[in-house]
Amino acid sequence: MSSVIFLAEPMVTFAQVPALYWHNIGFTKFCTNVRDNLMPDLWALWGYEVSASVIFVTSQCIALSTDSCLYSGDLCKQFISDSSTVMGGKCGPSP
């Protein structure tokens, strides 16, 4: 299971899930979004077999890069604007 990236929008805080649980199912790395005074509501989890880098995090998006793909969790149209800014106005895969 550790060779996947798992995106979730849970209704609990990250601290409510024991770290040992994630480790036991193969997820050893994680990233959550930042929402100022609100609890994070987007999670990205992946295991040691996945080489992923966090590209950027907003209140509505987590974007990760791997050797072959771009993964993102998106809740609203703001993602398009955020992505465009980070990618220099170019969204989507390169031709």
Image (cartoon, rainbow, N blue to C red):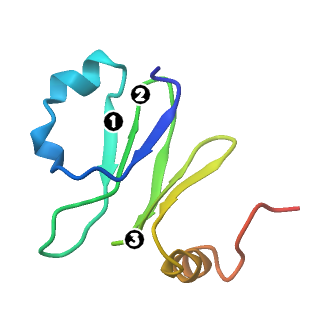
Q: Which residue is mark 2?
A: 47
SS type, badge 3: loop
Residue furthest out toward the right: 95
Disc ID at residue 29: 1
In the image, residue 6 sits, relative to residue 31, either above or below, namely: above
Tell me where residue 51 appears, x and y as whole percent.
Answer: 51, 35
Which residue is located at x 54 percent, y 80 percent? Answer: 77
Which residue is located at x 45 percent, y 68 percent? Answer: 75
Which mark is nearer the camera, 1 or 3?
A: 3
Tell me where residue 86 appears, x and y as whole percent.
Answer: 55, 75
Disc ID at residue 13: none
Which residue is located at x 37 percent, y 20 percent? Answer: 26
Answer few, some or many: residues within 10 Å of disc 3's Cα (few below 14, many 20 plus, some between 14 and 19): many
- In the foreground, 94 or 2: 2
In the image, residue 20 sits, relative to residue 5, either above or below, namely: above
Which mark is nearer the camera, 2 or 3?
A: 3
Q: CA distance from mark 1 to mark 3?
A: 20 Å
The answer to which of marks 1 and 2 sits earlier in the sequence is 1
The answer to which of marks 2 and 3 sits earlier in the sequence is 2
